[in-house]
Amino acid sequence: MERSVGRENMGKKITLYLVDNLPKGLRSVRIDQWIGKATCAPRTSLKKMDYEELKSSACVYFLVGQSEDGGLSNVYVGETDVFGSRVNDHDYKKDWWQEIIVFFSQDGSLTKTSAKYLECVCLKRLKDAGKCNIMNGNIPTQTTILQEDVSGLEEFFANTTIVLPLLGYDIFEQKDIKDVKKAGLSLFCSGKGAEAKGLLLEDGKLLVLKGSTAIMKNAPAFEQHNYRKLKDKLISIDRLKVQDDYLIFTDDYEFSSPSAAAAIILARSASGPIEWKNKEGKKLKDLI
């Protein structure tokens, strides 16, 4: 299956191959003109993975599982140049994950040092994004690499942020925030004790900006709402902090949809296309 994905005014040709003809089975992903490759497998299909292919390169990998409360996904990031023994160790010692995604270079150019650098970058930016529960017990220190290698590794990382959502894991922020703030459609969402400003992104997500406020007390029905778990998570990671009798966003936060953002801000079930408006008061549903 081939799919073109736009990024910063440039298209990308992406090939997603279903190895065993199952949408959620063993899959591989390539981006045209990129030396990298991704392999994704459910835990039950580990033996089907091509370990020989992975022997030629170091790799960075993600273990992913659903949290017990049904909220944000649990994610562990690692790196290795001995993939077979490492994944067998995780299979034996960690019981919480259901799927693994591995990124490596097809020409063997990704080294152990490069993989360590990518591991650190991924963990830092996952923490900044706040869109998953990080399961790493220790966060490694940043590896020193040659300055001329940084741009290539940053491009490698950028491609992982494109591939992961295609595999069902939208855990990184997708774009440079400075560029988003220039191009996004400015919108506002308000309620009793809440005044929020956001930007509608090209992919339909909504970025709520730092300093926006949200209602602290949940509506009774919201206590059983799926987005309540996300609200609790944002409070636990200090992305939302108590200020007087309301909550304030301590940094920008990217929501999967305008409705998700509106529900967190208004502490109730909410329709994003209705609650978000431009400065003239026109509803988002009418703007689009």
Image: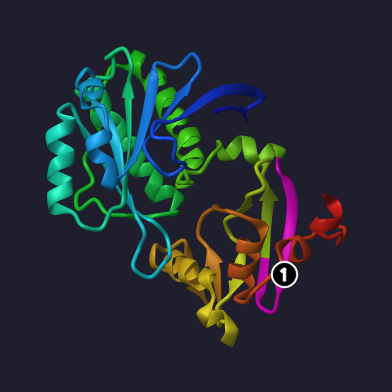
Residue 49, position as x, y percentages in the image: 27, 32
Q: Residue at x 56, y 81 (%)?
A: 218
Residue 237 shows in this picture: yes
* Disc 1 residue crowd, few under 14, some 14–19, many 20+, Cα 10 Å: some
Residue 256, position as x, y percentages in the image: 58, 53
Considering only vertical position in the picture, is 205 above or below 152? below
Q: Nearer the viewer, residue 184 or 103?
A: 103
Kind of residue at badge 1: Ser
User: In the rendered view of the protein, which quadrant contains the N terminus?
Assistant: top right
Q: Give the residue number, with chain letter if any, for mark 1.
A: 190
Residue 286, position as x, y percentages in the image: 86, 56
Q: How many marks?
A: 1
Left or right: where does residue 184 sit relative to residue 245? Answer: right
Q: Residue at x 50, y 41 (%)?
A: 165
Start and end of the magenta stretch? Answer: 184-195
Local SS, label 1 = strand
Residue 87, position as x, y percentages in the image: 18, 40
Q: Residue at x 62, y 77 (%)?
A: 268
Q: Residue at x 27, y 23 (%)?
A: 114
